[in-house]
Structures are given as structure tokens and as C-alpha cells.
Image (cartoon, helix red, strand yellow):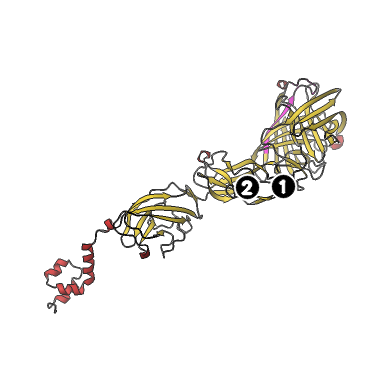
Amino acid sequence: MTPAIGCTHTAFRIRRSAISRNFALGCLVVVVAASSAAHARLSLALSTPKAADAYSATFVEQAVPSLIEVFTPASVSVTMRNTGTATWIASEGDVFLATQRPQDNYYWCIQDNPHGIYTGNRVRLPHDVAPGQDVTFAFVVKPLSCGFAATAPFRFRMLSQIHGTFGDETPGADVVVSTSAQFVSQQAPAVAPAGAHISVSVTFMNTTNVTWRSADGYALRAVPAGSATWGTTSVALPADVAPGGTVTFAFGIDVPAIVAVYNFQWQMSGPGDVPFGQTSPATPISVVAAGSPNYQGLWWAAPAGAESGWGIDLAHQGDVIFATWFTYDVTGKGLWLAMVANKDLTGAYTGALLQSTGPPFNAVPFQPLQVHSVAVGNGALTFDEAGNGTFAYTLQGVSQTTSIVRQAFGPLPTCTFGLESDLRVAYNYQDLWWASPAGSESGWGLSLAHEGDVIFGTWFTYDVDGTPMWLAFTATKTAGTTTPTYRGALYRTTGPSFAAVPFDPSQVVATAVGIASITFSDGNAGVFSYSVNDVTGSKPITRQIFVTPGTICQ
């Protein structure tokens, strides 16, 4: 068929003009021949439904963790329903689940879903989806790992590369993305006796942008999850922790009964017991056979509190106990006596009671040659299988026997002789301390009972007239983990005579006379500073070891 003269040129010239105009020119054949592609597109438009009807989707559900750590993989899922009339064909690579706000952003950095330049911001169709069917996109995100720094919400929408985005946008997920929890420090022994209950601590920093709230279920959990190696699988958050704040979990663990090496490792967990953030280092703890019972610590009359105002501190090393008894003389003035008690064949610890005089507490330098001790009586300490004790003594013609128990003002540590030869690694300071270097100022000392973050200290020294004087302080931890400092008010007390029966604690009068503080550089070295009635002083101190290698409390 021969086209009309002049129509060929006109047909090509008006190729994209209205079809009705071409019909009017009588160039239908030319137009059809020269513009078959345009006609095909026209026919498709006239014979198929609108794209909005063919491609539509509604949101069904999604599963997203409440907290996702940046640069850390997290599994999520989004379920959508095909509510259009066209089937989504997986093999065609046309339909995806795509990030939104902005579209195709890389903030969530979708993993293991390669698709050219869209790798990281689109999720491929897992299978064909017919109209009315649901499809679940299960995928892994790794926020910020694709280098997209701008924050984008967890929002997705279906996307066709031909027809554009369509259907519902997913609702905003209640998810926090942050650097989570940063490990700060932990205190756990390298060696522990089998079956003991010991104190440990773990510190984390909140590097999220939300407050950790104890009511929401934030906690410390053992690694691996559910491990009950140490008698507990999790420790509740002790208090809310604001962004940038730190929290120290101080708690007790039960050492396994079987001798072996066990890992000590912990991690934060959030609502729903979901772990997040860094883990603490996997610290090996060697569990060794338990030694003989050790009675190191501060004791007082039983039942606890019955005779508040006096006490006896025990430093127990091997088969020897160095006891310091803090009481009052017949005038009510503070009096301290010492006893080196050796274990006899009956299991009792017995020795002479010594009373000392020496240079005043503020003497500089302190002259140990001026210290004079005389035996003024004798004493005996006995203990039962339950760990209760009795203190029997004869002093200045007065003989008495008193039931005693440990003074507990916090978690009681477990003390073991010979457990560790390097006392510098100890983090519990319960022991008998004196001036450093050892023996340089023999004649005075500090008895420290350390429970939790509190140290009860008793300083036995001499008054300005050289007579025995003791002062007590309750020092709380104020700063530091590598060089912790404990600080508290110093008290001097008066009370009923050691011979008083019954001992009336209401007659004990404590008067604040100054401040005491101790800063420890390691487990076997510190500095004791004091201010007593405006007289200040500072002395380096170390543990008093009278039976090598000494005792460590945990």
C-alpha cells in the first residue's frame, strides 16, 4: 500500500502529537508503520488497569528489636500484603521493600541483599506474591555500616522500579540505635577457693541516648546467656543510668565446687532480656581446693548489736591470729589491747593480752623504740562449725566469756590464707595494716573491715600522754577504680569498762574529732591521711604479714 504524498514527512514530524490529529491527516498507515512503538504504548494504556490499581500494598506487621547497636548486625522482619491486581514476580527483579525518609537511604545498611547500586537500601522479594497474599521480608540490618551518617527512621515501603513506590509505609518502630554499652572495668580474683561466696563487681557506661531504667528490665547478664557457672545468671540494674553515666554492679557469686578454670564474663541486657553492647573481658578464674576456715575480720558481741561500742578485730594468717581488742578502761577512756594467739591442739587460739604505750599519734617521726608493751592478762578465741565464736579473757583480775559474731554492715567477704602470693592484686582491703615500709613504725596500726564499698577502720595509736588511744571511722568509697579512695569522719568514743556486766551500749558516747581517708594504689599499698583536732598527717601503709604469704579476702 502506498502512503499519501507528504504524509511520511508529516508522520515523523508529528510522531508525538495527538493520535486524533494524525487520523485527521489521513496518514494512519504511515503513522502506524512509523510509530508502532507509540501505538503499542497507547494500546497498553487503553487495555490495562491503572498502575495504582495493579500495584498496591498494606502493612501487616514487623518485628524490630527495641535497641540495635551501631555497626552490629540485628535481625528484623517486615510483612506486607499484596492488595493490588498484579502479581509481584521475584525473578523480574522489579519489586522490592525499600528504605524511606529519605527513599533508598543507606542508614540501616541492609546485609546480604545485593542488588547493584541498591545494595544496602532495598530488600529483594523472596518469592512471587499473588494478589491477596502476604510476604515476609526477613533481613539483617547493620546501622551506619554503609557510610550513611544521617539518621533515618525505621520506615519501609514497597517499590517497583517501573511504577515507583506504592502502598502503605510501615509505621515507625520503637527502636533505639546507639553505641550501646561500653565496658569500663571489672573486679574478679584470679584464684578463688571452691564453694566460697565472694564479692565481685562489673562497671559499664551507658553510651546510648536513652536512660537505662531498672523498671524496664535492664540488667547485667552472664556470658554465655543463661550460664549459671557463678550461681547467678543476671544482676538487676541497681539504679537508673542516664546517657553518659556509669553503673557498677557489685554482687556476690558462688564459686563452683569442682576444681577447674572458669571464665568470668558479663554483658548488658535490655528489655526482653536482649543483650547489647560490649562484653567484659573473658577473665579466667582458677578454682582451687578450699583451705582451712579463716576468721579474719571485725567481730562484736552476739547477738549482733547487743553491745555496740566495742569490738575485736582479727587478722588470721595460718595458725596465728593477731587480735586487737577495742574497749574501755575503768574510767571509760578508750583502751586497746593486742593478742598474738596461736592455735593449740584443741583448736582454740590463745595468747597473752598486751597493753602498750608509745609516742603520740602526731609524732614525726614516730619512734618505735619508745613503744613499750606489757602482758596484762590472757585471752582465748574459739569457733564452732557454724562460724560463731567466743572470746574468753582474764584482765586485771576480771574473767569473762563473751559470744561473738562477725560485724556485718555489707556483704561479708570470704577470707583465705595462702590463696595468693602477690597481695598487690587484691581488691578487698580487709586486713591489719601498718606503716610502710613494713616494720618502720612498729607499735601502731589500722584494722580494716572491708564490706562492699565501705571500710570500717579502727586506728590504734597513742594519746598525747602516750597512753593507748583508738579512733574509729566508717569510710565510703568516693572515687576511682584503679586508685580507690575511702573517706569518713573520725570518732573518739568513751563507754562502760571492759569489766561491766552487763555492758550498756547506751552509755557509749562517740565524738567526731576529724576526718580519715585512705587511697590505695594497689592491694598491698596505700596512703592513710588524717585530721584530728586540727592536727593533720599522712602515712604510707602496707599489710602486716606475720605468716607468709598472708591472707586475702574476696
Q: What residue is drawn where x is 56% and y is 38%?
A: 239
Write down the region rendered in magenta: 486-503
Q: Is residue 508 above or below residue 203?
A: above
Q: What's under tag 1, amino acid-wise?
A: Val
**Is 504 situated left or right of 67 in this image?**
right
Return the mark for residue 233. none
- What is the x, y in percent for residue 339? 83, 33
The quadrant holding residue 345 is top right
In the rendered structure, does residue 497 fall within the stretch colored magenta? yes
**Is 223 situated left or right of 99 in this image?**
right
Q: How many marks?
A: 2
The quadrant holding residue 18 is bottom left
Q: Secondary structure at mark 2?
A: strand
Q: Secondary structure at mark 1?
A: helix
Please identify the quadrant where the N terminus is shown: bottom left
Q: Is residue 463 visible?
A: no
**Is 187 situated left or right of 5 in this image?**
right
Q: Is residue 394 visible?
A: yes
Residue at image mark 2: 185
In the rendered structure, does residue 117 fall within the stretch colored magenta? no
Q: What's under tag 2, amino acid-wise?
A: Ser
The span from disc 1 to disc 2 (Cα, nearest Å) is: 14 Å
- What is the x, y in percent for residue 444? 80, 35
In this view of the protein, which residue sits in the foreground, 479 or 120?
A: 120
Q: Earlier in the sequence, mark 1 or mark 2?
A: 2
Return the mark for residue 425. 1
- What is the x, y in percent for residue 143? 47, 55
The quadrant holding residue 469 is top right
